[in-house]
Image: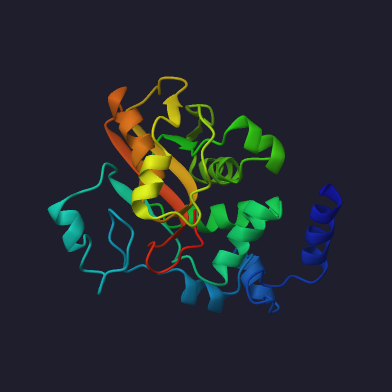
Amino acid sequence: MLSDWWQKNIARLTDPSCSLCGMHIKREQLLSSHHAFWCTHCRSTIIEHNRCQCCGLPTESPQHAHCGACLKSPPLWNRLYCLSDYQPPLSHLVSQLKYQRQFWHARPLAIELAEIIDNPAPIITCVPMHWTRRIWRGFNHSEHLAYFISHKVGSYFEPKLLRRSKITRPQRGLSSKQRKTNLNHAFEVADRPIGKHVAIVDDVVTTGATIEQLCKLLLDVGVETIDIYCVCRTTLSNNNKSV
């Protein structure tokens, strides 16, 4: 796996190309940005700014900061930042990061996400992974994303704030009701946070069942403001491949 990483980065240094479309990145873009992993065209077409600040779902215009559903019944978290829906080409990168152990995708995805976070939480944590699944996968992809985001925005990284105490079925393919039931008593607070404003990092948010469980735990121990940082935001009806 380490040799794959070296091959990936050596190729990028000798012939820099967009990791999304494969096109050559112009020299002026490389000079203007130290993290030019995507070409200008891909960045402009993928990152969507017209989204509800609470749930992260698309809105009709930038003037609609909150959708009607969130105005009527706000979620437990304060803000949700994401890059795009769970669709190609970002869905491919997330899948490669998560299931194919291509961990080098974490840094560019995290840096691009950090660029749109206008008010970073002082403490950043991640969705925890059960230790058995972590051994099987080799690493927690959400932890990698959280590490690079915290480094970019200058926040304190606390990966062990939350703990997964129970093995559960994968969320992939489950209905909204099944996802909530599946996560009952699956998490616990491992260490009390040192601040009142915390951000939780995950790769994809679908129904919000996972982050809702984590938000309840943090609110119960005194956290007052919770933000969600995710690469993709989707709905169960649009795509059943996310987790």
- Residue 39 falls in which quadrant of the image? bottom right
Residue farthest toward the left in the current orientation of the protein: 72
Q: Which image quadrant is residue 188 in?
A: top left
Nearer to the camera, 45 or 232: 232
Observer able to see residue 238: yes
Residue 60: x %, y % from top left? 25, 74
> Could you tell whether 4 is left or right of 183 in the image?
right
Front-most of residues 160 and 195: 160
Residue 217 at x, y percent in the picture: 35, 29
Q: How is the image coloured?
A: rainbow
Observer-nearest of 27 and 132: 132
Total count of labels: 0
Q: Position of residue 89 (x, y in %)?
A: 57, 71
Report if residue 120 is visible in the image: no
Is residue 170 rendered to the left or right of residue 8?
Answer: left
Q: Is residue 55 above or below residue 92?
A: above
Q: Residue at point 51% right, 62% down?
A: 241
Q: Nearer the viewer, residue 93 or 26?
A: 93
The residue shown at (21%, 66%) is: 64
User: Residue 199: which quarter of the image?
Assistant: top left
Residue 15: give x, y in percent of width and height.
Answer: 79, 72
Identify which residue is drawn at 42% across, 38% down.
183
